[in-house]
């Protein structure tokens, strides 16, 4: 039952106005929806409203009771007037809504999540983004338990009832699709501030957090104000309502949600203080707060016509939040982080059964397409446009896109068209990025003519077939490169538009050094055979920090693959030279050095080969780590000396802590460092340093690990967000008893299968990052995750469907593991009540659809 982009049809009816009245109750919430409905075009088709898990109690058209035809998924009115008022009364059960989609309870509070198709769990409606209405919302609830009653737009009225209940009325002046509707009712601590827009309007800013967490909301508020100022300055985009609210909740399927004027956030992307949050948390909060804020223009004011166009708002908004992060922090480090996501996760998705273009052509369950491909590859596609058009050209395109489509629900083609029209360029070929899936392989051959001194490069692109598409075409690739000659380096961007093209790069007295894909200018895999000396030169002398990092990682990766194949790990002269070189500039260029000194992740290594030997690769990685720990141990020690500054989230300190963490990671591989590690743990006054010690000990399986973990638990057992870090450390601990431990922890007092953060922390870390445990040859890891998925799917299919990801990417595993995984996937398929979410993925993995 898949939906296809090609089958899109305009809605038969529009709903310009909607009034919603909520009588909140844990199990019997009543929703009265009164809407104005207008037939669109000349037809006599029935009106079919979406609706799921609703108890219908009353329906009237223009004040007259009617009897529509109901099913599990919709409500059909055989014949209706051209224009009429529809009143529908339904009941829902928020307290038993464990899917966390629609109206549900997070702790004591009521809240909603409607994107993509959750509004239909609140009332019967045309739950599609091209149906946009003006919303009026009245919420009634017990005043003592729910002092705050929130919805989109402006608060226009409020009152009290004699029985201890109260009500509030909200009015949102902007037309919006149902997925942007939100409601929150609860008791919170409130952090307030204000922002004056560039045109001088005053906006009230409010962040609602659980009682007792007020001191953890400051960073989120500062981030919001930075994001608002940045969007004005960078894109001329100003906020449009008088109030902007953010509510942090503990039960949330994703990161956050950009509901108009009322963002809902997973509390992990709001709350931070030095004691409980890491530098990474601070970074993520700033970036997610910005992301949701930026959606106000790229998503809300200009929205998607249909869900196949999701990347229209997500790819663009991720790109914008990436630009923002680069402006707020170290741009090279921010870029490296993004490239890791692409290589570890997006390349894996492209190589697996769920491969899809950034604009999918076919969808069974929309929630399955909130993917790294739609989001992160989507952002890479926007970035390539930015590279091709330049900063100013891109801005011209953005201006035209916004002014042309403000208030509309549009398509990815509309976006590219605006970029094209504003810049007078032809982007027809570029559009292929929207419909073609897969990771292109870019082959590079350099040629130097001794006689003439001419240096040329031959580029060739090839995209291997993917599960969803057997045949691929050439794409438009911007290839940024650097030529390092004896007189410095030269950068340029080549535009590859054919399968093969040769480009002259100039005249040189001696053969220069070529470095390709500066800034990761296109989301491709690079096939460029370079000798180790060349890579070392790039590490030391290239301009672009990304190229320097990438060359270091290539050197290490090749060494690791070689070691895995030969079953023997050695520290070659070149590898030693690399670490010596990097350690030399480490005290000045801390952040970049830290990235270079860290070995490529197992996941990244796995994507570099058609077939991998899991055990051999893991062994090689560990062996190299130990060799480096010994060989450079004075340097690790010197660089890991702690500073006595008290914690601030600020670039210089972040870089120091990051480098220190990498050094501790090596030191933990030596048995003589217990005192140093113990004291690093004891003297730490912040979560970043504390977690660095725990992680180092966990990865090296150091004897200190279990004692420190016990201490950590006794200290933080009452703090839910911090305990997630503890669960994650246990989940990803590669240890012979890890399965038994995992089993035990699922009954820990702080664990709950109903809370997505817990599931991701414990079971997610196991499946994604406990390589040895998950891929154990007795099949125990696969079986455990499958058993858990069977339980979880009945509770929360969306979370189950994310958790299954590591079970899908088995194409490069050995036959035995492929067999084991296939057996477990078959077990899932045997479950007759499997969710649509899991069914789509499992059936594709088993090649049944
Ligand atoms: N639009 C949200 C964001 O990217 C994500 C919401 C996704 N929700 C879902 N159920 N798939 O900020
Ligand atoms: Zn988003």
Image (cartoon, helix red, strand yellow):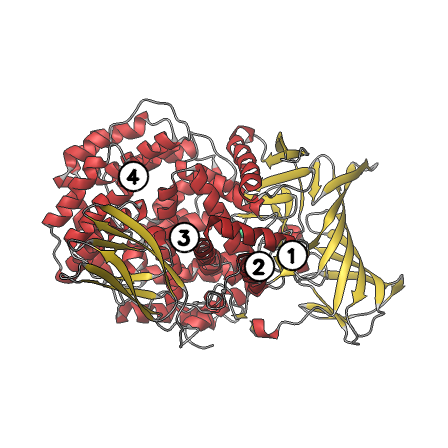
Q: Is 307 above or below relative to 46?
A: above
Image location (x, y in percent) of residue 185: 68, 42
The image quarter containing residue 327 is: top left
Depth check, mark 2 against mark 4: the one in front is 2
Place of residue 298 in the rendered image (x, y in percent of width and height, measured from the top left): 58, 51
Check the image and report above or below for 154 versus 764.
above
* Nearest to viewer (mark 1 / mark 4): 1
Q: Are marks 4 and 3 in contact (CB under 8 Å)?
A: no
Distance Cα–Cα, label 1 vs label 3 = 43 Å
Horizontal relation, residue 517 to residue 107: left or right = left
Q: Position of residue 518 (x, y in %)?
A: 32, 52
> Of callouts 1 and 2, which one flags the residue occurring earlier in the amino acid sequence?
1
Quadrant placement of the N terminus: bottom right
Question: Which secondary structure lies at badge 1?
Answer: helix
Identify residue for label 4.
706
Q: Which residue in the protein does label 2 denote?
A: 418
Estimate the spatial distance between the alpha carbons at disc 4 and disc 3, rounded to whole Å.
Answer: 19 Å
Label 1 neighbourhood size at 10 Å, few (<14), some (14-19), many (20+)?
A: some
Q: Mark 3 highlights which residue?
A: 763
Q: Secondary structure at mark 2?
A: helix
> Disc 1 designates what residue?
405
Query: Which residue is drawn at the image coordinates 56% and 46% (left, top)?
Result: 294
């Amino acid at each position: 039952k898949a939906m296809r982009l090609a089958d899109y049809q305009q809605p038969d009816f529009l709903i310009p106005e909607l009034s919603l009245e909520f009588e909140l109750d844990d199990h019997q919430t009543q929703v009265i929806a009164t809407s104005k409905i207008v037939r669109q075009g000349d037809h006599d088709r029935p009106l079919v409203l979406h609706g799921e898990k609703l108890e219908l109690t009353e329906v009237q058209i223009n004040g007259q009771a009617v009897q529509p035809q109901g099913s599990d998924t919709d409500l059909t009115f055989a014949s209706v007037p051209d224009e009429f008022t529809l009143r529908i009364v339904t009941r829902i059960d928020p307290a038993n809504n464990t899917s966390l989609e629609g109206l549900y309870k997070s702790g004591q509070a009521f809240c909603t999540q409607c994107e993509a198709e959750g509004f239909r769990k609140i009332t019967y409606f045309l739950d599609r983004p091209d149906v946009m209405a003006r919303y009026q919302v009245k919420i009634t609830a017990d005043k003592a338990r729910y002092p705050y009653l929130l919805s989109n737009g402006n608060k226009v009225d409020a009152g009290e009832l004699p029985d201890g209940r109260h009500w509030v009325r909200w009015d949102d002046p902007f037309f919006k699709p149902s997925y942007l509707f939100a409601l929150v009712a609860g008791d919170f601590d409130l952090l307030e501030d204000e922002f004056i827009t560039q045109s001088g309007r005053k906006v009230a800013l409010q962040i609602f957090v659980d009682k007792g967490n007020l001191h953890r909301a400051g960073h989120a508020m500062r981030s919001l104000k930075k994001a608002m100022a940045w969007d004005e300055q960078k894109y001329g985009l100003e906020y449009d309502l008088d109030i902007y609210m953010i509510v942090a909740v503990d039960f949330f399927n994703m990161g956050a949600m950009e509901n108009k004027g009322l963002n809902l956030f997973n509390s992990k992307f709001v709350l931070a203080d030095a004691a409980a949050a890491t530098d990474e948390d601070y970074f993520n909060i700033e970036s997610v707060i910005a992301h949701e804020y930026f959606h106000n223009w790229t998503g809300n004011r200009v929205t998607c016509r249909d869900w196949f166009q999701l990347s229209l708002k997500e790819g663009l908004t991720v790109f914008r939040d990436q630009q923002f992060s680069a402006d707020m922090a170290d741009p090279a480090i921010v870029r490296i982080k993004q490239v890791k996501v692409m290589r570890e996760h997006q390349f894996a998705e492209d190589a697996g059964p769920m491969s899809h273009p950034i604009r999918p052509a076919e969808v069974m369950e929309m929630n399955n397409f909130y993917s790294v491909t739609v989001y992160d590859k989507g952002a890479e596609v926007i970035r390539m446009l930015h590279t091709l058009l330049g900063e100013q050209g891109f801005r011209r395109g953005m201006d035209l896109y916004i002014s042309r489509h403000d208030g509309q629900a549009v398509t990815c083609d509309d976006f590219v068209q605006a970029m094209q029209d504003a810049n007078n360029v032809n982007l027809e070929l570029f559009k292929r990025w929207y419909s073609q899936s897969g990771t292109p392989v870019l082959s590079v051959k350099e040629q130097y003519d001794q006689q003439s001194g001419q240096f040329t490069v031959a580029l060739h692109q090839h995209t291997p077939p993917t599960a969803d598409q057997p045949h691929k075409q050439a794409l438009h690739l911007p290839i940024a490169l650097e030529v390092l000659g004896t007189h410095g380096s030269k950068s340029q961007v080549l535009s590859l538009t054919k399968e093969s093209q040769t480009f002259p790069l100039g005249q040189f007295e001696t053969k220069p050094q070529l470095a390709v894909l500066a800034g990761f200018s296109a989301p491709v895999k690079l096939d460029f055979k370079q000798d180790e000396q060349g890579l070392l030169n790039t590490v030391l002398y290239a301009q672009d920090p990304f190229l320097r990092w990438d060359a270091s990682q290539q050197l290490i990766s090749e060494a690791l693959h070689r070691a895995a194949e030969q079953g023997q790990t050695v520290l070659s002269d070149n590898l030693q030279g690399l670490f010596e070189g990097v350690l030399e500039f480490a005290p000045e260029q801390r952040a970049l050095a830290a990235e270079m000194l860290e070995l490529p992740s197992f996941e990244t290594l796995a994507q570099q080969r058609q077939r991998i030997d899991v055990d051999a690769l893991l062994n090689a990685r560990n062996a190299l780590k130990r060799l480096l720990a010994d060989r450079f141990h004075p340097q690790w020690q010197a660089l890991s000396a702690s500073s006595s500054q008290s914690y601030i989230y600020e670039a210089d300190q972040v870089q120091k802590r990051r480098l220190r963490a990498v050094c501790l990671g090596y030191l933990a591989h030596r048995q003589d460092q217990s005192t140093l590690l113990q004291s690093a743990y004891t003297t730490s006054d912040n979560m970043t340093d504390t977690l660095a010690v725990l992680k180092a000990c966990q990865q090296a399986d150091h004897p200190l690990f279990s004692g420190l973990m016990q201490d950590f638990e006794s200290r933080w057992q009452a703090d839910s967000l911090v305990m997630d870090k503890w669960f994650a450390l246990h989940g990803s601990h590669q240890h012979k008893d890890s399965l038994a431990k995992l089993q035990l922890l699922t009954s820990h007092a702080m664990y709950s299968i109903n809370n997505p953060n817990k599931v991701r922390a414990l079971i997610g870390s196991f499946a994604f990052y406990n390589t040895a445990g998950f891929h154990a040859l007795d099949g125990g890891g696969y079986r455990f995750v499958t058993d858990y998925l069977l339980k979880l799917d009945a509770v929360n299919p969306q979370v189950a469907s994310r958790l299954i990801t590591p079970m899908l990417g088995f194409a490069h595993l050995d036959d035995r593991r492929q067999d084991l995984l296939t057996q477990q996937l078959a077990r899932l398929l045997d479950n007759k009540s499997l969710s649509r979410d899991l069914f789509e993925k499992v059936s594709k993995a088993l090649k049944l659809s």
